Image (cartoon, helix red, strand yellow):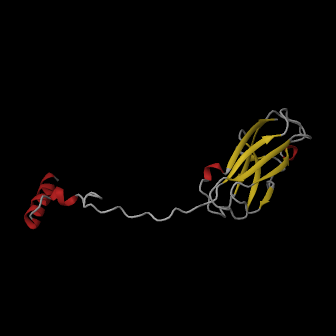
């Protein structure tokens, strides 16, 4: 193997009259005094974010506690229409859907101007059984799950809330 590499080096040196190692490396950009190409205008995109996902009461009451969700466009452009899903899973039971929550509640989210927000409420009792068994419940609010709009940051499109009931 070493002889083949040495042979290639010698062959390139003989044929082209230049060292092979130098010929293999491309010329560094910007050495010729040219300006780097302009990347063009940046695209302004919306950024739908779940800004709030919380309970209306500190203590869980199946009949009174409400989930509060706030979606805001914190991007640089208006958003298109999309949707919001609030779902519940049981992480200790093979991540199954909470009983009675399939399909999960879905909400229409109209187009939002830059800085505009919408609030949604969901009764927590919709996700909980009549009698608590001290199970962990993982609630999630997710916006634009179908990826209908371009979004500058998909990492803020959901929030999680964990409760034991």
Task: Tell which of 142 and 95 is nearer to you.
Answer: 142
Task: Tell which of 4 and 153 is nearer to you.
Answer: 153
**Residue 12 seen by the camera:** yes
**Residue 93 seen by the camera:** no
Where does the image place residue 104, in percent across and percent down from the top left?
79, 54
Q: Residue at x 17, y 57 (%)?
A: 22
Q: In this view, does 78 lie above or below 51?
A: below
Q: Residue at x 80, y 58 (%)?
A: 107
Where does the image place residue 58, in percent across and percent down from the top left?
83, 33
Is 113 on the left or on the right of 55, as rendered? left
Is 37 on the left or on the right of 59, as rendered? left
Task: Tell which of 63 and 153 is nearer to you.
Answer: 153
Where does the image place residue 50, in percent across and percent down from the top left?
71, 49
Q: Which residue is drawn at 60% across and 53% down?
A: 153
Is 33 on the left or on the right of 160, as rendered? left
Number of numbered labels in the structure image: 0
Q: Which residue is drawn at 73% across and 60% down?
A: 112
Where does the image place residue 94, in percent across and percent down from the top left?
70, 43
């Amino acid at each position: 193997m070493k002889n083949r590499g040495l042979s290639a080096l010698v062959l390139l040196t003989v044929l082209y009259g230049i060292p092979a190692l130098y010929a293999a490396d491309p010329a560094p950009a910007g050495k010729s005094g040219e300006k780097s190409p302009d990347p063009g205008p940046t695209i302004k995109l919306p950024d739908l974010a779940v800004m709030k996902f919380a309970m209306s009461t500190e203590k869980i009451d199946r009949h009174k506690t409400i989930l509060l969700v706030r979606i805001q466009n914190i991007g640089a452009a208006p958003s298109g229409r999309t949707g919001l899903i609030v779902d519940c899973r049981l992480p200790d039971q093979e991540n199954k859907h909470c009983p009675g929550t399939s399909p999960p509640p879905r909400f229409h989210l109209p187009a939002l101007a830059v800085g505009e927000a919408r609030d949604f409420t969901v009764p927590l009792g919709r996700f909980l059984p009549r009698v608590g068994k001290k199970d962990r419940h993982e609630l999630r609010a997710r916006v634009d799950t179908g990826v209908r709009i371009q979004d500058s940051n998909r990492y803020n499109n959901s929030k999680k809330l964990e409760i034991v009931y």
